[in-house]
Amino acid sequence: LPWRQRTRRLKRFGLPASDLTTVFTAYVRPALEYTAPVWHSSLTVQQITSLERVQKRACKIILGPLYYNYESAMESLNLTLLSDRRVHICRVFARSLLKPEFRDWLPPTRLSMTGRQTRNSYKIVLYCHTTRYRNSPIPYMYHLLNIDGH
């Protein structure tokens, strides 16, 4: 059965909203976020909307007649936007690349290139010559690391 039918069936059996939310976060959301660091940076607006629509539908099913709007539903079910979660997943993955065993996978920082201590010496230097490469996962990870100041 598709996830919507399963969720509706569980709701008919009388599961409380908290348990239905747990089912959604344990079974459906991981499928929506699988390998997010690889594909998140190149999603189109339409694809982002389609992914968010799945969570919106789940909120409507879980809350039933108590559903007012998506923002209040996420607040009452203690959920966050899927796009925010994907950014967080990408940040965690990018930070894991800073571990010593993966550090040589990254390009050098400004400090190691110039030898000068500046305000931006922690930033990773990466030049993207094409839009396709700029929207790929690697530059996106560097962008997140540079924003956070790793």
Image (cartoon, rainbow, N blue to C red):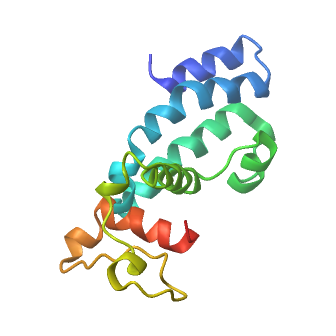
Q: Name the side, left or right, on which 118 lies relative to 22.
A: left
Q: Quadrant of residue 62?
A: top right
The quarter of the picture where the C terminus appears is bottom right
| Nearer to us in this view, 146 or 33 | 146
| Nearer to us in this view, 150 or 87 | 150
Residue furthest top as drawn? 13
Q: Is residue 139 above or below residue 17?
A: below
| Nearer to us in this view, 65 or 7 | 7
Q: Is residue 135 above or below residue 37?
A: below
The quarter of the picture where the N terminus appears is top left
Q: Quadrant of residue 139?
A: bottom left
> Residue at point 47% right, 48% down?
96
Where's residue 52, x and y in %?
52, 50
Does the rendering let one see residue 45? no
> Residue at point 50% right, 51% down?
86
Where's residue 99, x and y in %?
46, 49
> Residue at point 28% right, 72% down?
134
Where's residue 61, x and y in %?
65, 33
Q: Quadrant of residue 20?
A: top right
